[in-house]
Every structure is written in structure tokens, then in C-alpha cells.
Image (cartoon, helix red, strand yellow):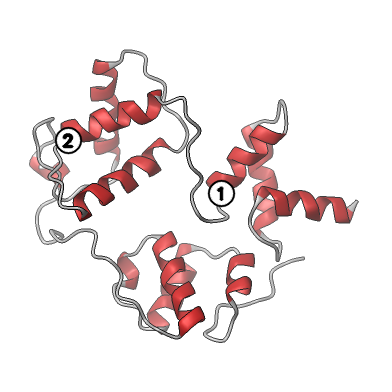
């Protein structure tokens, strides 16, 4: 069950999806395919561009998420609530700023797993749609996401976050450490990276 497939232009989408690829591997492969701005893409964006190539043979131009990359980082300009979001970075100082300001609005606010990922995707979507954001807007969205009782929509990839969430939901009393150990095993298996696939593989083994 260990992965044998290597990244190549002749692989199938199924082979891509059944393997677990580190971001560095995907970046190297994307550069070999001449996908533009490969080094600046997130892992999910790299996979999507590679998937398009494997399906159609076409090289897609990724959406430019940060048109102001030549400007100073927001954190270097001094973070405050009225600062316009121009060049956001996921550094410790920015995360601490959001956390502190959120706790001023809601003392004792507890952070839900997956909130920062979804906050980043929300921010990118707003900016791509021409919305001018201030850090005050990020703080309010951060609070909203943490306070929401709705189950987060799953990320459309057979990924770590989805697996951990499904593992803990399906196995009463399971710990995150147990889920991480299971994920570590799944990464090495030549099957979809989903909880359901992991369960089926265990059933066949037993």
C-alpha cells in the first residue's frame, strides 16, 4: 500500500489524488510543467493547476491573489483596526493582533479549529471581488467564524483537516493525537486521502 507513483506529466488524476505530495514536491513539478508563479502558489492551488494539466494538457494562469506584492507588508506598516488590508502575511504578530482584538470584542473567545484557514480564504475572495478590507473587518470575521455553531463546509480536497474532523466525529472519545497517527499512516498509502478510504483499508487488512 505504500506510494510507488512519482509525479510525472503522464500520471493520471487518480494517481495524483491517491498520493500525498509535499508542497515542495508540487512546486518543483509545477515549475517543470512551466506553470506560472509556481513558487508563490498555495498547495491547493498547485494541485488544481496540475490537475488541469493532467486532464487537458493546458497550462492555466493562476489567479493573482496579491497584486501589491511590491509594497511593504501590512505588519511592517503597523497593524491597527483602520489599516487597509494590502499585503497580508500569516506571521505570528498578525495572528496575535487578530487574537487580541477579537478577545477585546468577546472576552474569553475560544478559537475553533480551521478558522484561520477559512479566514484567509474569505479575505482572498473579498479582495478578488474588489472589496476594500480593513483589519477591523478581519477581526469581525474572525469572531464570527469562531462563534459560529454551523459545521464548516469541508475543504474540497482529501486533506488533513477533513480527515482529522471526520476521524474525531466518527470515533467517540478519540483524541487528536490518535487522529494524527492515523493520518500519518494514510499519507503513505496509495488510496484517496479520506477517512472513508482509511476505514475501508483497515477493514480489508483485518
Instruction: Please state the horizontal and vertical placement of residue 4, each as a whole percent of the image.
Output: 69, 75
65 over 148 or under it: above or below: below
Q: Is residue 40 left or right of residue 179?
A: left
Instruction: Please state the horizontal and vertical placement of residue 90, each as a whole percent of the image.
Output: 29, 45
Helix, strand or loop under label 2: helix
Helix, strand or loop under label 1: helix
Q: Is residue 128 left or right of residue 46?
A: left
Q: Residue sitting at 44 percent across and 67 percent down?
A: 48
Q: Residue sitting at 79 percent across and 53 percent down?
A: 200
Q: Is residue 114 left or right of residue 17?
A: left
Q: Disc 1 or 2, which lies upstream in sequence?
A: 2
Q: Residue sitting at 68 percent across and 61 percent down?
A: 188
Q: Which mark is residue 89?
A: none
Asked whether residue 89 is in view, the answer is no
Q: Which residue is mark 1?
A: 160
Frontmost residue, 186 versus 120? 120
Instruction: Please state the horizontal and vertical placement of residue 81, each as a whole percent of the image.
Output: 13, 30
Q: Is residue 72 left or right of residue 111?
A: left
Q: Quadrant for the N terminus, please.
A: bottom right
Frontmost residue, 58 versus 34? 58
Instruction: Please state the horizontal and vertical placement of residue 181, each as a whole percent of the image.
Output: 68, 44
Asked whether residue 191 is in view, the answer is yes
Amino acid at each position: 500500500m505504500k506510494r510507488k507513483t512519482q509525479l510525472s506529466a503522464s500520471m493520471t488524476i487518480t494517481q495524483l489524488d491517491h498520493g500525498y505530495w509535499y508542497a515542495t514536491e508540487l512546486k518543483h513539478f509545477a515549475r517543470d510543467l512551466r506553470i506560472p508563479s509556481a513558487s508563490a502558489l498555495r498547495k491547493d492551488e498547485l494541485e488544481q493547476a496540475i490537475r488541469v494539466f493532467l486532464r487537458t494538457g493546458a497550462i492555466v494562469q493562476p489567479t493573482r491573489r496579491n497584486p501589491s506584492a511590491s509594497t511593504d507588508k501590512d505588519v511592517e506598516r503597523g497593524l491597527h483596526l483602520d489599516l487597509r488590508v494590502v499585503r497580508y502575511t500569516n506571521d505570528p504578530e498578525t495572528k496575535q493582533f487578530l487574537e487580541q482584538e477579537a478577545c477585546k470584542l468577546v472576552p474569553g473567545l475560544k478559537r475553533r479549529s480551521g478558522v484561520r484557514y477559512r479566514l484567509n480564504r474569505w479575505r482572498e475572495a473579498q479582495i478578488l471581488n474588489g472589496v476594500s478590507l480593513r483589519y477591523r473587518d478581519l477581526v469581525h470575521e474572525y469572531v464570527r467564524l469562531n462563534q459560529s455553531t454551523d459545521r464548516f463546509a469541508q475543504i474540497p480536497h482529501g486533506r488533513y483537516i477533513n480527515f482529522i474532523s471526520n476521524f474525531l466525529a466518527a470515533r467517540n472519545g478519540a483524541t487528536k493525537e490518535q487522529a494524527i497517527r492515523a493520518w500519518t499512516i494514510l499519507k503513505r498509502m496509495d488510496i484517496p486521502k479520506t477517512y472513508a478510504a482509511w476505514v475501508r483499508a483497515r477493514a480489508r487488512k483485518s
